[in-house]
């Protein structure tokens, strides 16, 4: 990156720890191994406060696992998005009316990380109420992209992505509706995973749409993802595939249209590299099914958001009413989106039909893949490069679609809409001036196969980037 960019070369190179193994390496030989990595992370978070990735720090954070140093994440600092419950820390959703309010119990996903030895160090900034894809937030702070300070970190889990990309923590949790883990991971050069809805516990979060939202991790490598996924899913880590020979990956014509030139070049470069490694690239036109799925997802979100917010407030903070929260929303794009939902454009009948369509479309997509003997769909995570960090999302609400939000989620939205597992991998080829993500999308419930393939795909992409 040159010219207009402002890059943290000093922070992203050298011997600074980035991965789980490297953070654990800080503890080896230490007289206080349970807190060495945590102290490093706390110091780094304070030094990089101008990134606005962190909403709250726990200065007293410590290891609590009964297994001690044998725990898989022993002493590893983790950051958690500000709409996921962490006991004794605020859960505000990045909105003014909930500032400073804390919860008394961990979300189950957080509890699993803590039991595995992870230290829950921080809550991260986000797009207000998770209704956006840029993390622009005039109240809580707008997370800057550590790879390029002029660019958005993506959203809505932008603070979590920025915290990992800046080397503050090696693992962060976000939530994903239509791409809110995968988009920021792609924009910050990370690995991000949206699991099937049954894979991880989903309670203890301020969900946009309870039937759509999942918790998802962001890390540096697929090896770290397999480790963290095993903890969150409460199962042994997935075993990586030995090779790509015989793996069939589907490309749809729609995923080759409307791409930024750099995204197009990097995507085609990746496909060629995967074919050289033995993968078979198969073209299938899934446009009709995919667009129907995206439409169903939008109906579900618009119908569920306000009732879900009211129920979540009653559970966490019963003295705060939904009207107070909505009246004090700080972000204009979020106010616009909420106004559209309040207008009641979606009926209960339309909502019920969308739920039925969602399941039918997922089954049809699985049937298409099985008929082609294919393992996953492959496409750019976002068809466009990140825009300027200060540019707010604009969403449907005035009768006009404006590209900022819609372009970011144009490819990633389907996985959330119809409950498909999806993982984004960084493409940092020789021509990319800013991170481009490659998404692999599997069949509902077939997360193991998808993650196994992703690990091998990552190996191939690394080889061809040398």
Image: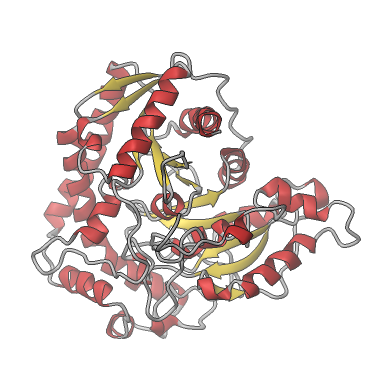
Q: Quadrant of the C terminus?
A: top right
**Hey, which quadrant is residue 380 in on the image?**
top left
Question: How far from the left and from the top, in percent, is residue 10?
Answer: 63, 60
Question: How far from the left and from the top, in percent, is residue 240?
Answer: 58, 27
On the rendered structure, is 259 left or right of 376?
A: left
Question: How far from the left and from the top, in percent, is residue 75?
Answer: 75, 57
Closer to the camera in the image, 60 or 64: 60
Residue pictured at 29% horizontal, 53% vertical: 408
Q: Is residue 461 above or below residue 150?
A: above
On the rendered structure, is 265 left or right of 192?
A: left
Q: Quadrant of the N terminus?
A: bottom left
Closer to the camera in the image, 242 or 146: 146
Determine if residue 123 is in view.
Answer: yes
**Hey, which quadrant is residue 309 in on the image?**
bottom left
Closer to the camera in the image, 370 or 405: 405
**Residue found at the far left of this picture:** 399
**Residue found at the far front of this picture:** 3
On the rendered structure, is 187 left or right of 19?
A: left
């Amino acid at each position: 990156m040159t010219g207009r960019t402002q890059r943290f070369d000093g922070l992203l190179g050298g011997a600074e720890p980035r991965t789980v193994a490297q953070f654990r390496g800080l503890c080896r030989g230490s007289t206080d191994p349970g807190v060495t990595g945590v102290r490093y992370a706390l110091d780094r978070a304070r030094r990089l406060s101008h990134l606005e990735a962190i909403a709250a720090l726990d200065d007293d954070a410590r290891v609590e696992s009964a297994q001690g140093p044998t725990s898989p994440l022993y002493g590893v600092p983790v950051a958690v998005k500000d709409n996921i419950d962490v006991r004794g820390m605020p859960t505000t959703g990045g909105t003014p009316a909930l500032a400073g309010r804390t919860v008394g119990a961990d979300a189950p996903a957080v509890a699993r990380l803590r039991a595995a030895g992870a230290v829950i160090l921080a809550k991260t900034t986000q797009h207000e109420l998770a209704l956006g894809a840029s993390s622009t937030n005039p109240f809580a702070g707008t997370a800057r992209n550590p790879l390029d300070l002029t660019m958005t970190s993506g959203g809505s889990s932008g603070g979590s992505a920025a915290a990992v990309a800046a080397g503050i923590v090696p693992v962060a949790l976000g939530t994903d509706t239509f791409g809110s883990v995968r988009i920021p991971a792609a924009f910050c050069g990370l690995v991000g995973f949206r699991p099937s809805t049954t894979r991880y516990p989903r309670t203890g979060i301020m969900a946009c749409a309870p039937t759509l939202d999942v918790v998802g991790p962001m890390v540096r490598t697929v090896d770290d993802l397999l480790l963290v996924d095993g903890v969150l899913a409460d199962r042994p880590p997935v075993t990586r595939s030995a090779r790509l020979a015989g793996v069939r990956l589907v490309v749809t014509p729609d995923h080759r249209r409307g791409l930024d030139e750099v995204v197009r070049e990097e995507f085609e470069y990746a496909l060629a590299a995967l074919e050289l490694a033995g993968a078979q690239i198969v073209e299938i036109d899934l446009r009709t099914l995919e667009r129907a799925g995206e439409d169903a997802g939008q109906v579900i979100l618009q119908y569920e958001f306000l009732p879900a917010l009211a129920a979540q407030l009653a559970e966490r903070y019963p003295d705060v009413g939904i009207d107070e929260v909505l009246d004090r929303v700080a972000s204009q794009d979020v106010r616009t989106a909420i106004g559209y939902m309040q207008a009641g454009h979606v009926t209960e009948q339309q909502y019920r039909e969308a739920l039925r369509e969602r399941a039918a479309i997922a089954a049809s997509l699985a049937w298409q893949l099985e008929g082609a003997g294919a393992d996953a769909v492959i496409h750019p995570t976002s068809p466009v490069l990140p825009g300027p960090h200060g540019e707010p999302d604009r969403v449907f609400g005035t009768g006009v679609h404006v590209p900022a939000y819609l372009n970011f989620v144009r490819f990633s939205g389907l996985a959330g809409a119809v409950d498909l597992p999806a993982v984004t991998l960084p493409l940092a080829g020789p021509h990319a001036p800013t991170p481009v993500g490659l998404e692999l999308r599997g069949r509902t419930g077939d997360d193991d196969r998808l993650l196994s393939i992703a690990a091998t795909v990552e190996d191939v992409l690394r080889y061809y980037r040398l």
